[in-house]
Image (cartoon, grey):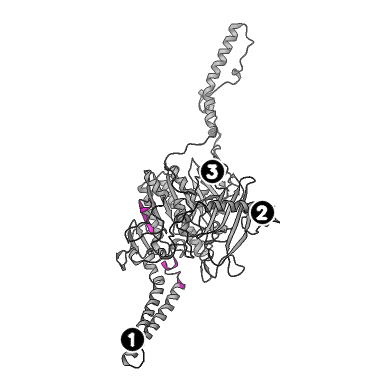
Amino acid sequence: MMQMEGGGVRQNLPEAGKGKEAASPLKPPRGASSAHTLTSAQRDPRLTCDIQNRETDFSGPGPSGKRQDNMSGLNNHRNCWPLMLVLWLLVPTSTPIPAKPNMVLIMADDLGIGDLGCYGNHTLRTPNIDRLAREGVRLTQHIAAASICTPSRAAFLTGRYPIRSGMASETEVRVLRWTAASGGLPPNETTFAKILQQQGYTTGLVGKWHVGVSCETRNDHCHHPLNHGFHYFYGTPLTLMLDCGNKHNQKAQALRATYWFCTRTLACAMLLLALGRLTGSLPISWKTVGCFGVCVLVFFVSWYSSHGFTRHWDCILMRNHKVREQSMVLKRTPSLLLREATSFIERNKQGPFLFFLSLLQVHVPLTTTRNFLGRSQHGLYGDNVEEMDWVVGQVLKTLDNEGLTNHTLVYFTSDHGAFIEGRIGDTPLGGSNGIYKGGKGMGGWEGGIRVPGIFRWPGVLPAGRVIHEPTSLMDVFPTVVQLGGGQVPQDRVIDGRDLMPLLRGQVPHSEHEFLFHYCGSRLHAARWHQRQGARLWKAHFETPIFSPEGAVGCYTRGLCPCHGKVARHDPPLLFELSGDPSEATPLSPTSEPSFHAVVSRIQEATRAHRSTLTPVPGQLSGSSNMWKPWLQPCCGSFPFCGCQESAHPRDEL
């Protein structure tokens, strides 16, 4: 069992291939000859200094001998200056950070922290992500600002809690449901891409967006990536869903069959009524027949808009503002995205560039290419994880081939925890959150918000370091902005903190004393990193009610709610995560003498946090999250939309 908690920073021990000696820049490779371990003096005879001669002998025969010895000692001191300079240079100091590095930010979708080898999984093969961890810095307490896609990604892009931008829902619909919805990341929000674009960076996004497209017209693209600082976009503007696939939407297909049967039955009934009215065999009015017909039409539109149109309207690929594939052919979508990812790096290798690879893996329907099917020990989900790792490896290989590795900051994470309730029948579609309780959709429990966090930058960040301090996905914003020469906005609250001092070991603690955990617009929990004593407290004000009874998840609903059927706690549930990272045993005034003092301090910080919030228009509720035909991206003439991306020899993984 790995040690997940504790304060401060420790040097990571090798996790793969235990017993192997850790590589050290000060130690020759195993098997190297002793000729490779020459001293500085042996490498350069001019640095030789006779230490014994520096001890001046004053017992010479008279004044002339004394002066001669003094002069000899002085000359020897002068000869030592080169050696002293070299020794001074060898003293460990902070290496200056190179200006404007390239940046590759990789975000998985619905990946659990327990799905990776470097976080303790021994049954899934993730060698490329594990390599990133060995060569960089691994964060064990990396926290998403939300436990579901849209708000988490909004916070990642802006460095702000999603409630500040209106991306936290007041209803149970917590993500954008339609490509043609008018909600999304407001144009007045500042993303890290927008700032780096102003600093001369070429910025690109390949993969999932899911924070909106247009506001009022189909072509205003107010929420589009190109309006938020990206020069280039290729991917899906919404997200994957079961209906995007043909193999793994049996439940939806069964519902469609039922709805089609009901629709046809009702339509036949309407025709019989109309025929009866025409022949006079039924004493009913045309008004009654018309009303019945309207009801049949409303029934048809209500189910077909959510089941019939979904794949065609929302499962699409765009390049910049144009739809390139409608609906997408999932079996080759991963190959298309990888092609675009490597191509962006190759085109912009002169730099500086910011590249955000927003992976579709490992979101349902777990589209996996044939080369990876059946390879893992964990079914389709495991296959998809291993394919994702391979894609990451291809991106790293491209950086190596282009000679960009040492001048590129690479970051890997997931938008939130694994979807533990995801399944079709007895087939699980979600991953593992390790020892942490809960999962996707649960705003307070660790399993929904604790995610992988890995930074690699050879020569700048120490290899193999593990940090147990609280950090956030929102910290990426100020970190990359300042690395790129930009300034963090001063006209708004930025909740993220620059991570570079912590990553480089220049400071012992994270700047986050408190972090707040929202479920929609409801504040479900807060954590306090008590610097004195290095204790980590977490208070839950509200928690979802699991179902069925005894389960750790909301399996009867499919996703845990934020409002309504939740348990409210006064006093809050209190856990000490340093000793109980699984949140198994809540503390009480009896078991914890400082219970009331800790709860009081967290509540005080929560009130202070709430005082910084200002009302903003909601982006995920009401009409903002409804399908609007006039906003629907379309390849062709609406509603006759349809096109396919051109085939390419590299479109097979």
Helix, strand or loop for disc 2:
helix
Kind of residue sitting beneath label 3 = Leu
Magenta residue span: 227-251
Residue designated by label 2:
595
- Closer to the camera in the image, 642 or 159: 159
Instruction: Say whether residue 367 is left or right of residue 281.
Output: right
Kind of residue sitting beneath label 2 = Phe
Q: Quadrant of the C terminus?
A: bottom left
Query: Can see residue 202?
Result: yes
For marks 3 and 2, give the one nearer the viewer.
2
Q: Position of residue 241 (x, y in %)?
A: 44, 65
Q: Earlier in the sequence, mark 1 or mark 2?
A: 1
Instruction: Say whether residue 553 is left or right of residue 639.
Output: right
Q: CA distance from mark 1 to mark 3?
A: 76 Å
Kind of residue sitting beneath label 1 = Trp
Q: Position of residue 70 (x, y in %)?
A: 58, 13
CB-based contact (under 8 Å), mark 3 and mark 2: no
Q: Vertical placement of 481 versus 576: above or below? A: above
- Closer to the camera in the image, 221 or 290: 290
Residue designated by label 1:
286
CB-based contact (under 8 Å), mark 1 and mark 3: no
Helix, strand or loop for disc 1:
helix
